Image: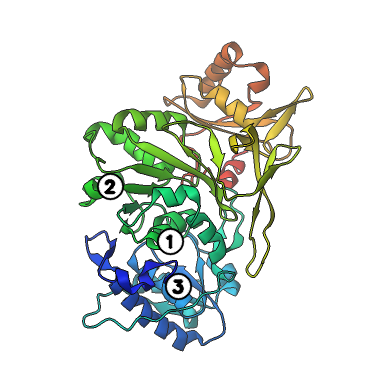
Amino acid sequence: MKQWCKIFDEKFKNQIAIVDENDLEITYGELYQACFLLHNKIKESLGLKRRSVLLYLNPDADFVISFFAILMAGHTPFLVTMDLKNELESLSQHFDSVLTKSSYYDYLSKFIALDKLDIVEFEKEKGELSSYKDFVFDENQAMFNSHSSGSTGVPKLIPGTLKKFLKTTRGKTISQMVSSNDFVFSLAPFNHAYGFLVGVFIPFYYGSRIRIKNNGFSFQDICNASVINETTLVVSTPPVFKYLVEYMDTLPKNFFEKCRYFISSAAKLDENIIEKFKEYFNLKIFEIYGSTEGLIVGTRDTSQTLNWKIEEEIEWKVEATQELLIKTHLRPNQEEEIWFSTGDLVNILDESKGIFELSGRLESFIKVKGVKVYVHEIEQSLKQLPLIKEVVVIKHPAEEESIAFIVPTEEGDPKKIERTIREFCSQKVASSRIPNIIKILSEIPRNKTGKVVLSDLKKLI
C-alpha cells in the first residue's frame, strides 16, 4: 500500500498530511498509527472474510482514517451521502457493519440494526508509532462501493477498483498538476468518487497536505480558513464558485495568491461564473468531466479553452448517435476493460487530440418537424434573455415536448413572467428552440455537488 498512499510510507511519517477545521495538524505517521489501531478493532469485529463497511461520517480525519483502516483489515468501504434516511434501511443488505460517530448513533439506530453500528473517534495517540507493515492490497479488488445516484435519484451501487484509481492518478494531466509541495483545500464531498479521488487519494499518492472542512462549507468557512494563503490547489464543486462569485467584492483580489488552480467537477460550470471568477481573481479553473464508473474521462483548462480534451490514457470511440463510449473496469477482478456508455453526446472537434464539446445527453432531444433539437440548445438560447437568471430544460417524460424550468431575475406573477418570456422568445429565439412548457421556480433543485436533481423537477410536471 505504501506504493500508492504515503500514509504507509515511513519516509513521510513526519510530514503534515491533514490540517483539520480546528487547525489541528496531523502527520502521515499519526494517520498511520490511527489507521493501524482501528484496523485491529475492525479485524476483531468482522473477522477475515471480506465484508462491506458503510462509512456514515463527515469528510474529516475520521473518514480518512476509517477508509484506509477498512482496507488494511481486508474489507471494503461503502460510501454514501449523509442525506440518506429511509434508504439506509433498504441498503442494509449491501453492508455488514457501519462506522460512525457517537453523535449519529441514536439517529442511525432508527434505520439500522444496533449490532451493525460501531463508533470511531480520532484522537492523537501519544508515544511511539506502531512499526510499519507493508500491507498488500490487490488492485483488482473493489477499493470501495459507492451509492451513487447523481442527478437521477436512482441509486447505483458502483464499485471502484484500485486499478482504476491508479490509472487516473498516474495519468499525464494529474501527474503534471499535483506534487508533494502542494497544499490542497478539499471542499468536495468524500463520499463522492470525484471528491475522494481528487481531494484525498491523489494528494496522498503524491504526499501533499490537505485541508479538510468538516460537514459542508459556507462562504465564511472559506474566508476564515487560516491556511487559505498557503493553499495551492482547491478541489471544489460548482456551488463553491457560485458562493465566491456572489461575495467576491468583499475579498481582496490576491486572496488566493499562492493558488495555482481551482479544480471543479460533478456538474458543468456556468460560463458566466467562469468568466467572472477569472476576471476578478485571475485564477485558472481546471474542470473535470467524468463519472463514478469512468472517473476522470476528460478535462479542460478554462483559462485557455471551453472545449474538453479526453485524457491520453482513456480509450474512446463515438457511436453513430454521437454518444461517447470509453473503456473502463466496471467490476472487481475484471482483468480487461470493457466499453461503457457514458450517455453523453459529443461533437468531436479534433479526433487526433481528443478535443470535443459536450452537446447533451443521449435521451435529451425532441423532434421538431422531424428535426432533432437538443435540450442543451434550447437552454443556451434561453440564457441569452436578460430576464432569466437560471434555466434547466428537460424532455417531457411522456410527450415529444420540451419543458423549461426558469428562475427569473425578478420576482413576480408567474403567468406574467411566462408571457414576457414568450414575447422575448418570439423576437430573439428560433421557433424550434422555444420551449413547449415553461415552469417558473424560485430556485432550481440541486444536490450538494451542484447537480440538478432531475427527479425533483419531474415531480413538478
Question: Against 273, is 144 above or below?
Answer: below
For marks 1 and 3, the one nearer the N-term is: 3
Instruction: Tell me whether circle 2 and circle 1 mark residues in contact (CB < 8 Å).
Output: no
Q: In front: mark 1 or mark 3?
A: 3
**Residue 7 showing in the rendered view:** yes
Instruction: Tell me whether circle 3 and circle 2 mark residues in contact (CB < 8 Å).
Output: no
- 401, 207: nearer the viewer: 207
| Residue for point 55% across, 61% down | 147
Question: Against 236, is 382 above or below?
Answer: above
- Disc 2 marks a residue whose amino acid type is Ile
| Residue for point 76% across, 37% down | 320
Q: Position of residue 211 (x, y in %)?
A: 30, 56
Name the quadrant of the C terminus. Answer: top right
For marks 3 and 2, the one nearer the N-term is: 3
Residue under pointer 1: 201
* C-alpha gap between disc 3 and disc 2: 33 Å
* Crowd tier of the residue under label 1, counting other residues whose Cα lies within 10 Å: few below 14, some 14–19, many 20 or above: many
- Disc 3 marks a residue whose amino acid type is Met
Q: Position of residue 19 (x, y in %)?
A: 26, 60
170 sits left or right of 29 in the view: right
- Disc 1 marks a residue whose amino acid type is Phe
Residue found farthest to the top: 427
Q: In front: mark 2 or mark 1?
A: 1
Residue under pointer 3: 1
Dot 3: what SS? loop
* C-alpha gap between disc 1 and disc 3: 12 Å
- Name the quadrant containing residue 181: bottom left
**Residue 89 showing in the rendered view:** no
314 sits left or right of 365 in the view: left
Residue under pointer 2: 222
Dot 1: what SS? helix
